[in-house]
Image: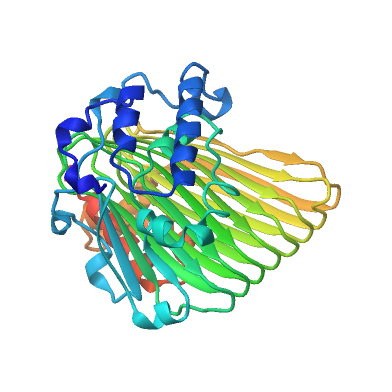
Amino acid sequence: MSTASIPNSSLTPGFSPEVFEAFLQTRDEPAWVTEGRREAFELYQQKLAEPLDQEEWKRVDLRAFRPGKFQLRDDSFNAGNLGTLMLDRADFAGSVVHVDGHYARGSVSEELKARGVLFGDLATMMREHGDSLQPHFATRAVQAGTDRFSAWHAAFWTGGTVLYVPSGVTIDEPLYSLIGLAQDGAADFSHTLVILEDDAEATLLEETSSATEDAAGLHVGAVELLVGRNARLRYVQLQNWNGKTWHFAHQSGRVGANGSLQWTVGGLGAKLAHIHQDVHLDGRGAEGQVNGVTFATDRQVLSYYTQQSHHAPDTRSDLLYKDVLRDKARCVWRGMIKVDKEAQQTDGYQRNDSLLLSSTARCDAIPGLEIEADDVRCTHGATAGRVDVEQVFYAMCRGLTRYEAMHMIVQGFFQTVTDRIPVELVRDTLDKAVERKLGIGE
């Protein structure tokens, strides 16, 4: 049965057992998917009675969060009303758009199809290529039992993007995925699944967007990035929700021997966002680079809990997050490098730098190390500081306005991250997004 045939009234607000059973009736999917949902919903009910992990969540205030205000929506909204930063600015090898948890449109080049590449709506791919996806979906990366949010997602996931690249296939042009929220009170549980087999290479640019500034929304998402031996994946997620959206996500990457994952995160929107981000280096010689750019204004709260896990020898991880905060915004970053006993010759690095544009903004940066091997190089650092008023004065004395001076300083602060990004479209998009963000309140 198609979700389009189910009236909105049958999907009532909240996520009770009755709502869950009504939701299942709207799904057209393999039996193993439905069974996985039922197991996840039981976990969700159990996890609701358990406290969240204190170390991860103690700096994130959820007292104002009311899940019962949100609901799953039908698929009647026009995706053309979504504002995006990247979609109309480049030609992509393929694109897919989801709105309010439902597939809206998509395309992929015939050349890629002929080479065995799968790219499109996850729900559709589950029906048509379930045998290929079942071994990878929610088995190796994101686990339903992690906490209440991962279980909640596993029970109610709706739309989402899948990218499968067969062994030895290289995709030169980037692919694009857009996740949108449109209707007031809509909940989105989209799931991104990327599978690169051995010696494959691809770039996926993903963006989240709200149709209007005043529509409240909820996103409980998951991202799984599975990189095979000698494979190379570049993944970018630009989070650009409006200021009334709650954003929760579990995101995990797993990298095989001599594989490479470059993961770039842009955090611009949301009322409150909390991302649990893991990078697992599973094979000898695996590499993971994580780049983060965050710009928070007003009363935004953007929180990241990152882990770099080294499970094999000769692995390398490098994480760099840069945060800019203004007004009464707050950023939280808790980072951890974990090194298993057998992961000798590991090189792990993590750093978080914060630039405060107002005296009322706040950042919490807590790096950490858990090392069991004895032949490693692992370092970390964190800095925070205010804008140097002499730099602003210097720029203004040379004819720049205060706004132009601040833009130059912020752009320069982010430069060390953007220089690490090889995709020109992403660098340009982040710069324009920062410029627009600086204009708020001017």
Which residue in the rendered view is the most extreme toward the right? Answer: 374
Q: Pinpoint residue 197: horizontal percent, then vertical percent.
A: 59, 68
Question: At 44% across and 64% down in the image, what residue appears?
Answer: 163
**Residue 386: quadrant of the picture:** top left
Residue at 19% in and 40% down: 6
Q: How is the image coloured?
A: rainbow
Residue 324, horizontal then vertical, whole percent: 38, 45
Q: Nearer the viewer, residue 345 or 296?
A: 345
* Left or right of residue 264: residue 83: left
**Could one spot residue 263 in this view of the protein?**
no
Q: Is residue 326 above or below residue 402?
A: above
Residue located 79% across and 52% down the image: 343
Q: Nearer the viewer, residue 442 or 426?
A: 426
Q: Residue at x 57, y 58 (%)?
A: 226
Left or right for 313, reference 179: right
Q: How many marks?
A: 0
Pinpoint residue 329: horizontal percent, then vertical percent.
34, 34
Q: Residue furthest top?
A: 49
| Front residue of this view, candidates 154 and 172 | 154
Q: Is residue 315 visible?
A: yes
In this view, 95 is above or below 53: below
Residue 15 or 132: which is nearer the viewer? Answer: 132
